[in-house]
Amino acid sequence: MEKVCVLGAGSTKYGKLEDSITDITIQASVGAIESAGIDPKEIQAGYISNVFGIADKQVHLGPVIMSNLGIPEKPSLSIESACGSGSVSFREAFANVAAGFYDAVLVAGTEKVTHTGTEWTTTYFSYCSDFFYEGGAGASFPGLFASMARAYLTEFKATEEDLARVAVKNHENGLLNPKAHLRKKITIDDVLNSAVVASPLKLYDCCPFSDGASAVILCSEKFAKEHSKNYVNVIGSGRGGSPATLQGRDHMTTIPSTKLAAQAAYKMAGIT
C-alpha cells in the first residue's frame, strides 16, 4: 500500500454566504491547489461531497467542479453520505491513492443551505434518516440526538451542565478559527438558559445551518516529496457502518460506525 499525504488545504469562511455552491467549492479547491503548489492539470481525479446541492439548483457536482477547474477530462465522483460526506470522500480518495490508482487527487466537501430557511432546511436534513421510520414520523435530527442525550444522562449519571461544557468548549474552539461560523464566547449559564430545541438539548448545544466548502489535495508520498517539503502523512484511516435508524442500534449512547472507523484507523496507525 502506498503512503498517502495531505499536500495542501483550502477553505472558505463558514456562515451565510452569497456565492453559489459551485463558486464556494471552486474557491476552496483553488485554495487547496495553491496551498499544494501544483498545477490543476496534475490532479488525476476529484472526489466532491455534497448532500443538498438541489437546494441551490446544482447536483452532480463532481464533473461540474472539475470542468470549472479546467480539467473536465479528469474522472470525478460525487459523494453523498449525510453528515459523514466529507470524511467519506476523504476516505475514498485515500483508498485510491493508497492502492496506487492515482498520484494526486482533489477532495472537497461543500454545502449551501442557509437560503432555504430553517423549516425547509430541517426538512431536507430529515431526508438523511430512514424517512419511513424517522423523518416521515416527525423526527428531526435534533430530536433524535436529544433522545441519545437523554439516554446518556441516564446511563452515565451525567447532568445538563455536563452537556453544556461541551458547547462552551466548542465555542471556544470557534474563537480560535477565523473561518468559523460562530465566533462567540459563551458560558455554562448561557447554554442552560438558551431556548430548548429538543430536551435536553438547547440552542447552544446545537450547530447552526451553515454554508461553506473545504478541500484538500491527497497524494502519494513520492508525489509529495517531488513537490514540497511541507506535507502531512496520513498514518491511519478507517470507515464503519451503523444501522440507519436509532431504533436499530443495540445502545442509544453508542454510534457503531464511529467506533468501528476509529478502531480501523488506530489499527492502521499502529496505535493501541
Image (cartoon, rainbow, N blue to C red):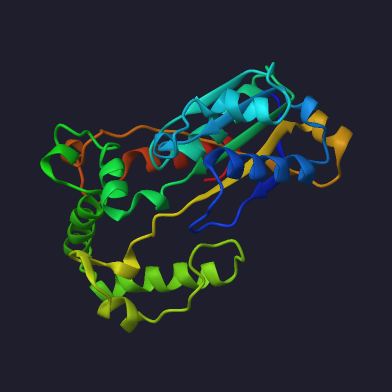
Classify residue 57 as left or right of residue 39: left
Q: Is residue 155 above or below residue 165?
A: above
Q: Is residue 173 above or below residue 227?
A: below
Where residue 187 appears, x then y in whole percent? 39, 82
Classify residue 223 as left or right of residue 235: right
Q: Is residue 145 above or below residue 44?
A: below
Where residue 269 appears, x then y in whole percent? 60, 40
Residue at 81% in and 47% down: 230
Quadrant containing the N terminus in the rendered view: top right
Classify residue 24 as left or right of residue 128: right
Residue at 30% in and 41% down: 124
Asked which quadrant contains residue 4, the reply is top right
Residue at 82% in and 32% down: 39
Where residue 219 appears, x then y in whole percent? 72, 31
Question: Can residue 210 be seen?
Answer: yes
**Along the line of sight, which residue is nearer the eye, 208 or 251?**
208
Q: How many marks?
A: 0
Residue at 56% in and 48% down: 19
Asked which quadrant contains residue 74, the reply is top right
Question: Can residue 98 be seen?
Answer: no
Asked which quadrant contains residue 143, the reply is bottom left
**Along the line of sight, which residue is nearer the eye, 219 or 10?**
10
